[in-house]
Every structure is written in structure tokens, then in C-alpha cells.
Amino acid sequence: MADVIVIGGGAAGMAAAIAAASCGDHVIVLERMDRVGKKILATGNGRCNLMNMGARRYPGGTALANRVLDLCGAGEQTRFWHYLGLRMRQEDGGRVYPISGMASTVLDCLRLTMDALQVETITGVHVDGLHPSKRGWTVMSGEQKWRAARVIVAGGGCAQPKLGSDGSTWSLLTPLGHTLVKPAPALTQIITDTAPIRGLSGIRARCEVRITRGMQEKYREAGELLFADYGVTGVCVMQCARYAAPGDTLHMDLTRAMGFNGKEDFLRELQRRRKVWAVRPQSELLTGLCVPKLAQALCQAAGLNGMQRAVCANLTGTQLERLAAMAADFQLMVKGVKGFDNAQVTAGGIASHEFDPVTLRSTMAEGVHAAGEVIDVDGDCGGFNLMFAFGSGILAGLDGRQAPW
Ligand SMILES: Cc1cc2nc3c(=O)[nH]c(=O)nc-3n(C[C@H](O)[C@H](O)[C@H](O)COP(=O)(O)OP(=O)(O)OC[C@H]3O[C@@H](n4cnc5c(N)ncnc54)[C@H](O)[C@@H]3O)c2cc1C
């Protein structure tokens, strides 16, 4: 019988295993994939943005995320990483990456520390049962059984199931009385009407994006957007996804992508160009501000046709107004968002108020904890999701004991 069984060898599970083992517990990690930490390797485009030094951004499970990070936030996690040997560097927006720039360095630190602490890691095990037993819990996978005094459920949500997390560990917790808050894909791409952006796939724009439903603004975010053949993606779009529904409108302020501050600022530049470029073709009007395909899409959407032949001097004030207005508010109809296969994170999961924020103990079942994305906590892009996974995993593993780092 082990002291602790950790279900799921992802970010939260490995942090939990290290914290428990470094307090002297005999720990077993059960992982369904052929090796631990597959998702970590895919994070941050292979660079692993493992935490964020800035203000916290958790649209889902805010209260629990704040309590956990008050206890095990950037300072405590930095000490944890130093204990594991990892050196890090901070980039724009408070994003923290391993100094090597490689996610595999983070995984090596976790994996090799688990080995050094004699954590028993068993891969290829899909846990499908969790039952109370005489002095703790029995964990089942088909006919196989393991017993431990404490169990930490860290099976993640169901974002990108090909990397391991398929939502199966929610159903270990719901029979114990826990509530499942409806899961939905978050940090994912937005599918839109594609006619206005045909041919723009692969083009990037730094701009401000808004989602509206009728007259109501649901969310706004600035950052890099990437046009795609199904709609739009990029960090600012992915952050909007949890607020977007079919029938909503996605607005882009593309004046910012061209270096201007809204419609009036851009209009002044168009008027200046009409004057100084009077004899140049209208098709050259946006030269130097954006790629020709985007210029063409904007002009087309503003109803400026026949630009090949006419010269800039012939542009009317109304036409320039229309073009400036279109650039400041380029609209696409939202058709939906990409599903769990593409999402980086799951919004929803096991209700966050059902866990003690100090130890992540279940308030429903003694000796059971949860950590990471299995809980209804989700953060924005920028390292917030891994930061919660590591922080909650550490607290669950320590279970109220002093960290040795
Ligand atoms: C492509 C991509 C990029 C990302 N980039 C970042 C980033 O740069 N920064 C950031 O903060 N966040 C990022 N995220 C989100 C972040 O990776 C997750 O929020 C985080 O990994 C959650 O950690 P976790 O341990 O809770 O779950 P996971 O990392 O999903 O781990 C769960 C583990 O449990 C195992 N498991 C599941 N069910 C069972 C079962 N029944 N039995 C046994 N094992 C089971 C899984 O195989 C998996 O190994 C990214 C996500 C993706 C998909």
C-alpha cells in the first residue's frame, strides 16, 4: 500500500508527486499514456510558458485560483523550480519560460526529480475506478488494483485528448458527490463567415478584437490575430473564444495593425495620401501599411471597386470615410468555436468550491484531492494554466506540510 496515488502524470500530477515524495511519502503515479508529461512538451509552442509574474487572469474558478496562488504563486513556484534545478527567464507580459527555451527541459526536471525521489511511475494505465477501502482508497484500471491512504486526481480536462487528458477522471469524482460544471473548449480558434477574408489565410495583424451579441459587448482583447481558412486565431482571438457563440459578431480594429489609433487617425492618413499620391493608382493607397491581400479585402469590404484604373485624387471623401470606418471595425459573423481537439484548455470541470484551497482536499471524500485542469479553473494565455496546475499540484502533494525547498 502506498501513501499517495496520483492519477495522471501531467503538470499537476508530477508536481503533486514531487511535493508528496519530498515530504517522505511513498508515491505511485498512474498515467494512461506511454510516458508522462506529453502535454507539457506541446505547451508554449514547444517552449513551455510555465508561469506568469503579472496580474492573475483566471476567468474560470477565479476564487480558488486566487487562494491557491496566494499560497503557492510565482515566488513559491520559483523556489520549487530552483529545487528541481530549473533556471527560467521572463519575457513580455510577465511570461516565464525555461532558460533553455525548450519545454523538454521542464519535463526533464520533473521526471528526473520524481526518479530521484523514488516515485513509482506506471504508464499505460487508464484508471477507471476509485473506491473507498479499509484504510484509504483503491484505484482500479480494469482488473488491476492499487491501494493508498491518499489519492490525488490530476487527470486534466479534455482539451487535446491526443495528448492524454480525455475527461475520464471527472467520472472518478462525480460518484463521490462532486459536481461537474459543464465543460467547454476555451483558448481555441473562432470559426467565422469566411467570404470577407477569402485569401487572407496566414496573414497576421496586431489589433484589437471585440465580440458583441446584439448591442452588448461580451469581451475585448488586444494582441496578435491570424487569419485562417475557417476564420481567425491568435492569442487575442483564443482569449475571446470562451465568450463567443454562433450569431455573435467579431469586430477587428485593423487601424492598429497599420500603426494608427482608430478611425480618425487613419482617415487623416488616407486624406494625406490622396493629396500627395494624387496620380498614383487607387490600388496603391494602402501600400506600406499592410500586405496587398489585406488591402484588397479592406477596399472590397468598403465598396471601393475599380481601384486598378482610377487614381487616388479621384477618391471621394465618403469613400475614404467608408474605408477608414471599415478598417476600424472590420466585422465577421461568428459561426462557432473549434472543439476540444483544438482547444488549449477546458473551461468547466469539477466545481472549484468543493476543494479546500490550502490542501486541495475534497470536501466530499476524505483522503481524496484534485489538482490542475480537472477542476473548474481556467486561465488566459500567458502561463496561467500551467501555473495553476503546478501550484495546486504542489499544495495537494504537501497536504498542509512545510515545503522542503
Ligand atoms: C497545445 C497546448 C499548449 C499549451 N500551452 C500552454 C502554455 O504555454 N502555458 C500554460 O500555462 N498552459 C498551456 N496549455 C495548457 C496547459 O498545458 C494545461 O492547462 C495543463 O497541462 C493542465 O495540467 P494538468 O496536469 O491538470 O492536466 P494534463 O497536463 O492534461 O495532464 C493530465 C494527465 O492525466 C492523464 N490521464 C487522464 N486521464 C487519465 C486516466 N483515466 N488514467 C490515467 N491517466 C490519465 C493524461 O494522460 C495526462 O498525462 C497548453 C495546452 C495545450 C493543449
Image (cartoon, grey):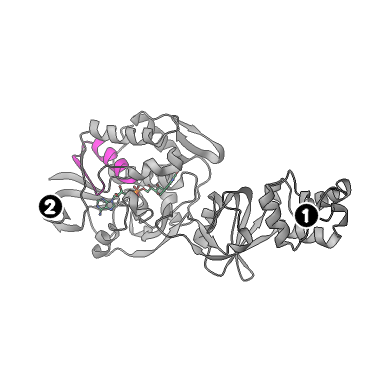
- Residue designated by label 2: 144
Cα gap from disc 2 to disc 1, whole angstroms? 72 Å
The three-letter code of the residue at mark 1 reads Gln
In the figure, is residue 52 to the left or right of 133?
right
Q: Quadrant of residue 132?
A: bottom left
Figure quadrant of the C terminus: top left
Residue 308, disc: 1
- Is residue 305 shown above or below 269? below
In the figure, is residue 231 to the left or right of 272?
left
Residue at image position (61%, 56%) is 209
Can I make out residue 328 in this image?
no
Figure quadrant of the N terminus: top left
Residue at image position (63%, 48%) is 205
Crowding near the residue tagged with mark 2, few <14, some 14–19, many ≥20 C-alpha atoms within 10 Å: few
Q: Give the percent coordinates (x, y) of residue 322.
A: 77, 61
In the figure, is residue 90 to the left or right of 285?
left
